[in-house]
Image: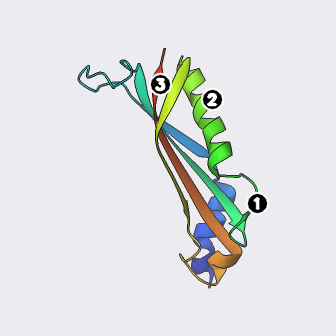
Amino acid sequence: MIRYLIVPILFLVFNCAISEKATRFNGMPTSEAKPDHYLKTTSFGLNVFIFIPVKRNAEFPESLETFSDFAKKNKGNKFRLIQKETTKWAFLLPPFSFILTPVVTELVGEVYD
């Protein structure tokens, strides 16, 4: 029974955001201009009953705030989001994941100086 609770417990303990920066793209500009770098931020959280955040909210508004913080820390003045994906893992280990639902939101964007 404990093995079914491992994923929700890990999300409860290790809810955080991870960011990756990519600077090598062969100098190809985008349609707007040449970005300084690309940034991918992944936020992890845990919800109760699929919709109520427990410790960290990994939904889009909070993930966007985290993304913009990482962009500022990497000397970005503006950014443009390319992709957004939110996954609620409610059917990962039913019925336990109906009660404690892991949530992952990934944002990818271009960061400009």
Pointers 3 and 2 in contact (CB under 8 A)? no
User: Where, by quadrant of the figure, is residue 97 drawn?
Assistant: bottom right
Residue 101 placement (x, y as % from top left): 64, 69
Within-10-Å neighbours for mark 3: few <14, some 14–19, many 20+: many
Please state which of residues 86 and 69 is positioned toward the viewer in this rendering: 86
Quarter holding the N terminus is bottom right
Q: Residue at x 61, y 64 (%)?
A: 102
What element does badge 3 sit on? strand
> What is the distance, in whole Å, between disc 3 and disc 1 at their CAs?
31 Å
Q: Residue at x 70, y 52 (%)?
A: 57
Is residue 20 shown above or below 7? above
What element does badge 2 sit on? helix
> What is the distance, in whole Å, between disc 2 and disc 1 at their CAs?
22 Å
Q: Residue at x 59, y 44 (%)?
A: 17
The amino acid type, in three-letter code, at marker 1 is Val
Within-10-Å neighbours for mark 1: few <14, some 14–19, many 20+: some
Comparing labels 3 and 2, the label whose residue is closer to the camera:
3
The amino acid type, in three-letter code, at marker 3 is Val
Residue to which mark 3 is pinned: 111
Please state which of residues 81 and 87 is positioned toward the viewer in this rendering: 81
Q: Residue at x 68, y 70 (%)?
A: 50
Please state which of residues 87 and 56 is positioned toward the viewer in this rendering: 87
Residue to which mark 1 is pinned: 54
User: Where, by quadrant of the figure, is residue 34 drawn?
Assistant: top left
**Most distant residue in the front direction:** 31
Comparing labels 3 and 1, the label whose residue is closer to the camera:
3
What element does badge 1 sit on? loop
Residue to which mark 2 is pinned: 69
**Most distant residue in the left direction:** 26
